Image: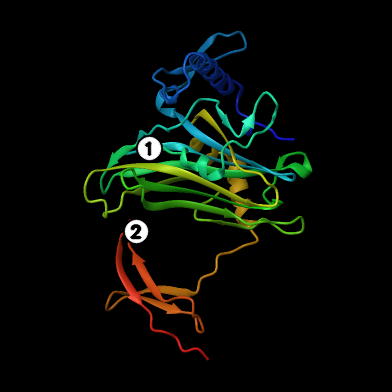
């Protein structure tokens, strides 16, 4: 059976009540208008006790509430969730485009079933931030996490078991608004198909829960209009695509990265991962003179050049390799 909505670990009662108030306020707003402005919160929210009395000692200031896209991919054996949000430029929130509080894509709430109206590509195209001006040196950041529920074992979060008939991929990239070209690939995750007898096979640049920050590269020499886009892809025998729900939360990065339970899960994803990246070359930094030495594996014929980038993504050297003899 398909399920809609997000799965989160338990929170303290008063914090749950804060979120409940937020949901009620937002629901009233949605009845009148459903647009991206619901994510702009200017008022501090306070917790209430069981008697509906405000507790002024527990509150959430506006800058700790953020908007997110929550992607959901469901198969017979797993429910995989990928959540991305808290987009910011120089510590100021960047709001999401095509976002509507509690709206769900590819799911019929009344029928409680999947409804494939958007392909993964179409869903990715509308999963982006508002357009913002940037120049080299600006700091952009976001939070993203992924986890899965083992539906064969009561829907528990289980890092050691991810049975997937489909390959699943997610990424975040910086896009030039005018040209539509990618400026930078910022983050990427790939989950390979996995059977009952194998451990998860995951390739990722960052941990399962990560706050990711980066500088706009020096190649952006003048103020440029850009946006950040989250992409999802799946392919395999299940016939499923990603669903997406739009939500507001008290900063997930703070909750998740400070939670021992989520830290243990993130560490377990690494230890239980059955796949490791393989390289066709090794690199070491040398001095006197200062240089980089790259050794290509003996017998490797697939590499024809090496392109070297600095920390900020700027290409500063391309070395064409000589043709290797074919024996």
- Mark 1 residue crowding within 10 angstroms, few (<14) / some (14–19) / many (20+): some
Q: Is residue 308 left or right of residue 253?
A: left
Let me know if residue 209 appears in the view.
no
- Residue topped by disc 1: 88
Residue 279: x, y in percent? Answer: 51, 71
- Residue topped by disc 2: 311
Secondary structure under tag 1 reads strand
Q: Is residue 53 left or right of residue 213?
A: right
Identify the image quadrant of residue 119.
Answer: top right
Which badge, 1 or 2, comes first in the chain's sequence?
Answer: 1
Q: Is residue 8 left or right of residue 320?
A: right
Q: Quadrant of the N terminus?
A: top right
- Mark 2 residue crowding within 10 angstroms, few (<14) / some (14–19) / many (20+): few
Residue 179: x, y in percent? Answer: 32, 48
Secondary structure under tag 2 reads loop
Q: Residue at x 42, y 48 (%)?
A: 173
Q: Residue at x 60, y 49 (%)?
A: 234
Residue 30: x, y in percent? Answer: 50, 17
């Amino acid at each position: 059976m398909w399920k809609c909505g997000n799965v989160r670990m338990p929170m303290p009662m008063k914090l749950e009540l804060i979120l409940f108030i937020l949901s009620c306020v937002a629901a009233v707003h949605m009845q009148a208008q459903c647009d991206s402005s619901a994510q702009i919160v200017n008022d501090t929210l306070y917790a209430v006790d069981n008697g509906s009395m405000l507790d002024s000692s527990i509150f959430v200031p506006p800058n700790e509430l953020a908007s997110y896209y929550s992607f959901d991919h469901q198969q017979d054996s797993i429910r995989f969730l990928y959540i991305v949000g808290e987009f910011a430029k120089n510590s100021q929130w960047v709001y999401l485009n095509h976002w509507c509080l509690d709206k769900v894509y590819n799911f019929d709430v009344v029928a409680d079933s999947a409804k494939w109206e958007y392909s993964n590509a179409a869903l990715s195209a509308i999963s982006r931030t508002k357009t913002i001006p940037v120049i080299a040196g600006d700091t952009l950041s976001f939070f993203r996490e992924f986890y899965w529920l083992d539906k064969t074992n009561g829907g528990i979060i289980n890092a050691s078991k991810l049975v997937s008939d489909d390959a699943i991929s997610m990424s975040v990239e910086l896009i030039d608004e005018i040209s539509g070209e990618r400026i930078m690939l910022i983050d990427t995750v790939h989950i390979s198909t996995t059977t009952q007898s194998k451990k998860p096979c995951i390739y990722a640049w960052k941990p399962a829960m990560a706050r990711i920050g980066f500088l706009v590269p020096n190649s952006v020499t003048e103020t440029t209009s850009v946006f950040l886009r989250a992409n999802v892809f799946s392919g395999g025998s299940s016939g499923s695509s990603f669903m997406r729900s739009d939500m507001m939360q008290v900063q997930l990065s703070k909750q998740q990265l400070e939670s021992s339970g989520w830290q243990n899960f993130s560490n377990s994803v690494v230890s239980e991962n059955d796949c490791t990246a393989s390289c066709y070359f090794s690199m070491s930094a040398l001095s006197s003179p200062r240089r980089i030495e790259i050794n290509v594996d003996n017998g490797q014929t697939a590499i024809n050049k090496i392109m070297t980038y600095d920390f900020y993504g700027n290409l500063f050297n391309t070395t064409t390799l000589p043709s290797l003899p074919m024996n």
